[in-house]
Structures are given as C-alpha cells and as structure tokens.
Amino acid sequence: MVKNNIIYALRHFRNQKIFAGINVLGFSMSMVACFLIFSYVRFEKSYDNYHTDAERLYRIFRVEEGEAWNDGVASVFPGMTPAIRERVPEVEHIGRLIHHDKIFSSFALTHYFSEGTGRTFNIDKGFFADKDLLWVFEHRWVEGNAQQAMNSPESVIISRSLKEKFFGEDAALGKTLQFKNMGINYSISGVFEDIPENSHVSYEILLPIASLPKEWNLDGDFGWGNFYTYMKLAESSDQATVEQKINSAFEGTEGEWFAEVGVKFGLQNIRDIHLTSHHAFELEANGNTTTIAFLALIGVFIMVMAWVNYVNLSSSKLLDRAREAGVRKVLGGLRSQLVMQHLTETLLINVCAMVVALTVLQLANTWFESLLGIPLTPFDKSQIGVTLLFMMLFTLGSVAFGSYPAWLYAGQKISVVLKGRSKNSLSGLRLRRVLTVFQYIVAVVLLIATLVVRQQLNFMQNQSLGFSMDNRLAVKKPFVPEQERETLRGNFINTLNELPGVQGVTQTTEVPGYEITRMRSVASGPGEDAPSAYLKEIAVDEHYFDVLGIPILHGRHFRPNRADSEGIILSLKAAQKLFSMENPSAKVGQRIYYEGSPYTLVGIAGDVNQMSLKQDSEPFIYTNHNRVKYFLIQLNTPVSSALMDSLEEAFDTSFEASHFDYFFLDTFFDRQYKADRLFGQIFELFSLLAIVVTSLGLFGLSLYNVTQRSKELSIRKVLGAGARHIFVLLTKEYGQLLLIASIISLPIGYLFSNQWLDGFAYRTSVSATSFVLPVILIFVLSIATVSYQIMKAVVANPANTLRDE
C-alpha cells in the first residue's frame, strides 16, 4: 500500500509540475528561514548556559535609592567580596573581575625568547581576577587545570588563541610574560580554550588581583566601583534570602556607606544577563528579550505561511481532484486510503523540500554566518541531530496542516462529484480567501518593520553626534617607562605631524564609543553647600577639540604643553547642570572646584554623543591632566596601504618594543549598532521571503482561478467583454483581500514600530510612507504575479475553450 501511494504521488507530481514545484520551493525556503531564525534565537538564549551549575551562578549589581531594580550599575566595590565570603554562608565561591583599562592606560605583555628577542602584543580582553573565579566560571583546559592555575600572585592563565599568538604550537605552561607597567614577570599556569561566543564576558588573559599593589587595600575599598563580582551559591539556596544577607553583611564595616544613602545590592543569574540586564557599565552590549521574542514570532509566522500556502493550493485543487476521489471510491477505495494517499503526497513534498533546504544551508553556510553574526554548524556531529529534529518537526506540522485538504479530498460524495461539482467548493473558497488575507497581513507587517528599521538606521547615520569621526584613527598608547614617556610621545607626535596624510594629532584618555567610568565632582564654590555635580571626566590635550571637530562655544581651548593642568572645560550640559542656567557663558574664567581643589573654567564645549543615539548626550568634564590612553590621528587623505605603513613605521621608530595597535573611530563607534543592523538585515531577508511565499501562492491560485473560470470568461468575451473588463474582473478580488489585510496589519505595524523606536533617545518620526508603500508594493507584486495567467485568459480564443467544454 505504501509503495502504491508513493508511485501514485510521483505520478501526480509529474502531471502537476507547477503546483508541486511551488510547494517544494515554498516549503524549502520557509525551512531555511525558520532554521536561521530559530538558530539565532537559540544562540541568544543560550548565553552562559555552558557553565556547570549555571542556575547557581550570580552577579551582584547595585541600585541607588529611587532607581528601578532593572536600572543601576553592573559593577560593585572590591571590599564587598571578603565580607560576603565571611558572612554569607550560602556563598560557596565568590570572585572579582576588573578590566585592565580601569587600572592602566596601556596593557601590553611581552615574552622574551632565549636568544634575546621579544614578542609584544597589546591585549584588549585582559582582566584582573580572583583565583576563586576559576571555581565559578567553566573553563576547558588545554594546559594545566583549575587546581594549579593562579596559585601565586605572579601566575596567569591565557586563552588558546593568545597562546598561539605568543608561542605558536609550542607549550606555554611555565613560560613568562612581562608586564612592564608593574615590572612583573608573570608565569603562565594554565591555558584554556577560547571563551565561547555565547558568553556575556570574554577574556584572553586573567591576571591575579593579588598581584596589584598591597597599599591599594582592595579588600577594604568601598569607593572604587568598577569590580564585577560573581558568586556560586550552595544548592537549594534562596536568591531573595542571599540578597537580604548581602545587604546586611556590611553593617559595622569600616568605610561602608551604602545603607545611609539608600544603595541596595541585588543578584542576577548569569544566564539572564545577556537578554535581560541593561545596567550601566555592562561588560558588553547585551541583547533584548523583546527583539528575540519578535524574531521567534516571525519564525512561527513564516512556518505558518508555508503551511497556509500548501493548504491554500491543495484546497484550490479540490475541484479538479474531486472526480478522481469519486472514481476511486466507485472502484472500492476507502476514505482512510484516500486520506493516506493525500498525506503521502504531503510527506513526499516535504522530504523534497528538506533535501533542498539542507543543500542550501550547506552551500550558503558562510554567507548565513556573516548575515546573522553567529556560528552556524547544522552538520556538525553535535548539531546534526538538532537540525534533523527541526526539519522533522516542520514536516510533521506540514502533514498536520495537510490533513485538512486530505479529509476534504477523501470526503467527497460520489453522487455529487461525478456530476462535476464539489460539496466543499463554497467553504473552500472562503478558506482560501481567509488564508490569503493572513499571508498579506504577515507580508505587510514585515515590510513596515523593515522600512522603519531602515529609516531609523539611516537617521542615526546622518544625525550629528557633535563631533566628526570620519578619517580618524585611534592608536593605543603603549607602555613607556616614566623617565622616557614625554620624549617618546613627543617624538611620535612630531613624526606624525610631518607625514603628508596627517592633519592633526591629539592625546586623550577616552575615545567616542567607549563608555566612560571615571567620575569626578565639580562644584561652583568651595563650601559643602555650593552647587555641585558628579560627572564623567576625559583628560585631553590642547588639540583634542580641533581633531574631533567639537566646537568651543564660549572661552578658549587648553594652552599647549599642559599649561592648563588646573583648568577645566565643561560641556554645555555640564555647565548648565552645575550653574542651573541656560546660558552659562558668563561663568567662563571664574573659579570652580574639581574634587575640592580650585580650578579655572577656561571654556564651554558643545555637547557630544559619547555613546550611540540610543542614549541621550551626557555632561562631561574635560581636564588637561597628563594622562593618555590613545593617540587620535586626523587624516586628510583617504586611507591607503602606503599611509598605514608610514604610520606604523613612525610608531615602531618611537616605541620599538611595542605592537602597533589601532582602529578606525567610525568603525569602532559603529559597532554599537551591530545588533540593530542585524535586526534590519533579518527583516529585509524575511520580508523578501514572505513576499516570495505569498507570490508563489498567488501564482498557483491565479492559475487555478483562470482554469476554473475559463468557460465563463469565454462566454463574456463572446458577449462583448473587452480585455480591460476581464482583467479587472480577475484582479479585483486580490485588491479587496489586500484592503482587508491592510486594515488589520497597519495598526499592528504601527504598534511594533513605536515600541521598537522607544528604545532610542534620538528617533526618527514614523512617516505615512512607511505604511502606504508596503501596501502599494504588495498590491503591485500581486498584480504582477497573477498577470501572466490573466493575460493568457484574455488573449485565448473563446471558440477553443467552448468547444472543449
């Protein structure tokens, strides 16, 4: 029986090539799209799940009085860790983590080989950490193990990638890396596999916090709030109870100030950080649960659209196959046999679609990875089961949806169908209209979302940030011994200024796109009652504002050679906040107080957006202190390999033992929009897919409608109906269905657009074009899709049709 059903199904496909091809193409495209969407959703939801006992791992955060529990700051104070370890018994392990740039302006490590040569690299993903953190985070060890690693203040652990940069394929255990900033030769006590991409914190090297100067007294420090603190709780511990104990653990501790100002501490499970945590100073830009939920919903809709398309096309063929069902019943066919026959056809179509989908995933895997920005390994041993399971579930859904037209096919009455009619023709017509409206709704909503996302991205790219970042290059400052610092920096800058492609150079502690953590107080007077503000500070030289194109609104720039080391420039918002006035220009030249010391306000600069346009511009303090992390270079010519070679040569000449590490400012700043660009690309791709799937369904339906109405159309033409009348007659139904879909889809699209745009401090206004254009586009594509079949009917000779009928 199964063999006969397969043979009959293949024969049917051969006779109905167009319908079979449409269904296979629609199913395969939908399988690929849904697999990509759910792979992305699965990846986003898998963050930090690879840790052993991930449900017991937590990070501490803090909120100030009056702040919502979801606000606050992701980092806390180093002195909290010893107190929690001693006074909260539910905490099995607790460890601190701090990024190197919160401590040092440069972070380069050097390995010296036996022949005296050295290899130096600037390391961006370097952290200082407690040994106990190795029992909180999961590591897969390449060399060494957790017991041996970081047992002394002079031992470090590194990733496999960093090990290969320094030592190639040679073993690294026991070899040394020199950190010149502290004059320490660290011994490598472990090598771990690279941190997985689905981790909210990524590092290449961990150095012991115990190696930092003892006089810093970190175990008793409750003022330095840049330490990320993680803990592993004992089994069956209650999160709320532990939070309560943590908030009371510091009572009577010297230096504790939290309780009197209303600062509270909370815990968040490590698995929830990536999608739900949006505190200040997160270690990386986190995802968004709303976005993930919406993408998952799109995936479901695309699946349903594919199934709807199949039901639509299958039910539209019911009239043609009704006679077939009647004849088979006359010859003794049972209803169950007819149902199985139709379901076999559905299953075979899905098997063909699955083969096509898997082939596409294999051939275009690299492109899909670049599109989504995540690793895709559908055919790896660890993933092939998930891939096939997804395809099977998709197929089962198709078979379930296909059972409806199967029962309609098998339920025909012999006395009716042999007369050329179907008892379900009217209900089938209504069903096809409802399903077509559903497809239109999904397509219109996706197109609206695509246009709004694209409009917002264009708006952000064209919106003024208050500074210029085109043709700006940032070079990380290497470590230089203090006695040589000024000389070598000066030599480097002088060499750069002599290059024909360089327009200007400045030294600074921060670059746009980097979240500033250094906070300092300024006050308008010396007393405690004087108006004051606690603001983010950037140390710059006299060329900073010119190189970045930031206007000085009032006053002047800093003078050369750090002559204004006791001078301050405030951003406009900072000055307005400090002096509580709209136009604070009269305050320029007056004495203000920086951290309690008298300084002179030498100027007021324009406001800038240090971070993305999702955030409002912030107030800043600019000081002329001699602290440097970056050299910012303004280029006056397009970047070329020759120019980059000249810049690297200038760097190598001035800093012989260091590695030339640079990035372009526009690229660095633009990384903040990576998730939004990905969101837009996904919408564009799947909007196109929705349109294609809808068009495939419309093409099949138009072919069926024209075939079914061929006699009617021939009679109309005999009676004098023109081509225009026939065209309008056959296309007006699609316009009516699209109108109904638009009434439903436009409010849905509007609600989505506003909800997504609410996440931006600077947002575009949603124009009517974003709603009208999708409807017009879908209508034009619908007419274009069905026009071929309609024009064939228009030019057909009515005599031939009526003779055949």
Image: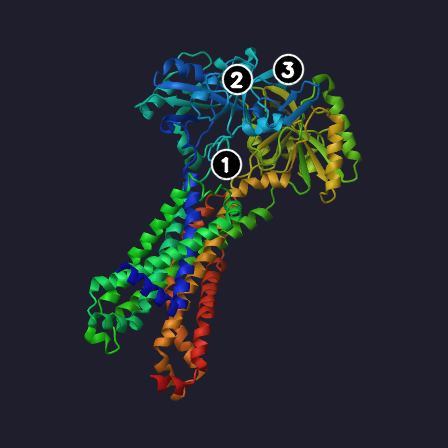
Which label sits in the foreground, 2 or 1?
A: 2
The local crowd at label 2, few if under 14, some if 14 to 19, many if 20 or more residues have their Cα within 10 Å, is many
Marks 2 and 1 sit apart, C-alpha to C-alpha, by: 25 Å
**Relative to 398, does residue 209 appear above or below in the rendering?**
above
Figure colour scheme? rainbow
Percent of width and height locating residue 613:
54, 42
Amino acid type, callout 1: Ala
Q: Earlier in the sequence, mark 3 or mark 2?
A: 3
Give the residue at x 42% y 14%.
83
Percent of width and height locating residue 737:
37, 67
Answer yes or no: is residue 262 visible.
Answer: no
The local crowd at label 3, few if under 14, some if 14 to 19, many if 20 or more residues have their Cα within 10 Å, is few
Left or right of residue 680: residue 468 = right
Q: Which residue is mark 2?
A: 209
Which label sits in the foreground, 1 or 3?
A: 3
Q: Which residue is mark 1?
A: 285
Q: Nearer the viewer, residue 248 or 647?
A: 647
Indicate which disc residue 183 carries: 3
Q: Are marks 3 and 2 in contact (CB under 8 Å)?
A: no
Q: Earlier in the sequence, mark 1 or mark 3?
A: 3
Answer yes or no: is residue 4 visible.
Answer: yes
Amino acid type, callout 3: Gly
Amino acid type, callout 2: Ile
Give the residue at x 76% y 31%.
650
Q: Nearer the viewer, residue 752 or 176?
A: 176
Percent of width and height locating residue 197:
49, 35
Identify the secondary structure beneath mark 2. Answer: helix
Identify the secondary structure beneath mark 1. Answer: loop
